[in-house]
């Protein structure tokens, strides 16, 4: 009988202990209570990483504002709850909006302190994914990847006689020449080329979109991430996709540089 009472007593004690433990845990993560969402705001993602580099994990909230679930976010913002001080900081990404929304909190700069990468589909016909990356080391926001970086190779170019396209980029030593003869009948119909292959199009130039797909990747597993992006190159009009370029970029000495790139050309299946 005595044993049974003792056992019950222990069960009650353990119950109280585990209750108070989980309660304390909740207080400790009081960011969940402290991050106040206004109407229409939703937490898209929450990641726990030490983004300011003080040795204590912080809570990084990606928050989007939209009218309905799955509709476009008219604004996307990031708030950091400092794990040590419990202070809340806004990461100023400027105007950022889009569909979906994805956040990666990984180290791109090689200092072992993770940066915050956010992406969202712009929803335009180009299928472009807008991306920003910010460092929050020492509680200071520093945007290290913005709209310009998201243009990748940012090709410019021209059509040349014989159904060819010449593409140039500041990141390439030599221009890239592509054969676009698979589309010659459309170009002749559209007065871009004459029947004998002479370029006659006015104000018609090929161009590249910003990245339409982008990922943080760490192929060699050293903990420092690079960016891999895929961008589309259009010829005479946007639906005239003449190539797709996939490239990997790393961040060094304050800027992003391509370390590998390859292109594909569509096959003529007719
Ligand atoms: Ca921290
Ligand atoms: Ca870093």
Image (spheres, rainbow, N blue to C red):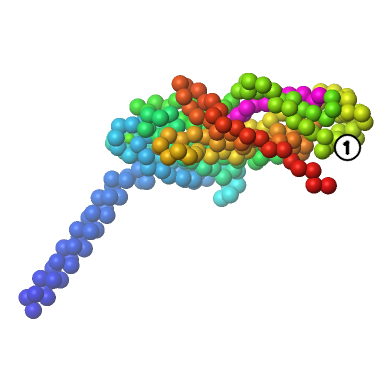
Between 11 and 134, the one lying in front of the other is 134
The magenta segment is 150-160
Q: Residues within 10 Å of mark 1 (few under 14, many from 20)?
A: some
The secondary structure type at the circle numbered 1 is helix
Q: Quadrant of the N terminus?
A: bottom left
Residue 102, image x and y in percent? 52, 42
Q: How many marks?
A: 1
Q: Is residue 155 left or right of residue 2?
A: right
Residue 222, image x and y in percent? 40, 37
The residue sitting at 18% across, 67% down in the picture is 11
Q: Is residue 261 left or right of residue 184?
A: left
Question: In the picture shown, does residue 197 fall above or below 70?
Answer: above
Q: Is residue 163 left or right of residue 18?
A: right
The residue sitting at 13% across, 68% down in the picture is 9
Residue 174, image x and y in percent? 67, 21
The residue sitting at 56% across, 38% down in the picture is 214
Between 34 and 174, the one lying in front of the other is 174
Q: Is residue 96 left or right of residue 160?
A: left
The residue sitting at 69% across, 23% down in the picture is 175
Residue 96, can we see it? no
**Residue at which label 1 appears:** 185
């Amino acid at each position: 009988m005595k044993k049974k009472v003792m056992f019950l007593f222990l069960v009650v004690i353990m119950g109280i202990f585990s209750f108070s433990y989980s309660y304390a845990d909740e207080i400790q993560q009081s960011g969940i209570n402290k991050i106040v969402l206004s109407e229409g705001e939703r937490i898209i993602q929450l990641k726990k990483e030490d983004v300011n580099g003080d040795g204590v994990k912080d809570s990084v909230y990606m928050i989007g504002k939209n009218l309905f679930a799955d509709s476009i976010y008219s604004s996307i913002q990031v708030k950091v709850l400092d794990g040590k001080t419990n202070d809340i900081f806004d990461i100023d990404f400027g105007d950022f909006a889009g569909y979906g929304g994805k956040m990666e909190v990984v180290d791109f700069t090689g200092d072992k302190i993770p940066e915050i990468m956010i992406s969202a589909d712009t929803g335009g016909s180009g299928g472009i994914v807008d991306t920003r990356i910010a460092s929050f080391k020492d509680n200071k926001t520093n945007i290290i990847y913005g709209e310009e970086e998201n243009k990748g190779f940012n090709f410019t170019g021209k059509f040349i006689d014989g159904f060819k396209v010449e593409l140039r980029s500041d990141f390439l030593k030599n221009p890239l020449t592509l054969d676009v003869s698979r589309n010659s009948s459309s170009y002749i119909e559209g007065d871009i080329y004459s029947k004998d292959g002479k370029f006659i199009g006015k104000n018609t130039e090929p161009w590249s979109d910003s990245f339409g797909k982008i990922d943080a990747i760490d192929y060699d597993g050293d903990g420092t991430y690079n960016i891999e992006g895929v961008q589309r190159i259009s010829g005479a009009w946007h639906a005239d996709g003449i190539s797709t370029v996939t490239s990997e970029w790393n961040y060094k000495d304050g800027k992003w540089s391509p370390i590998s790139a390859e292109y594909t050309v569509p096959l003529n299946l007719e």
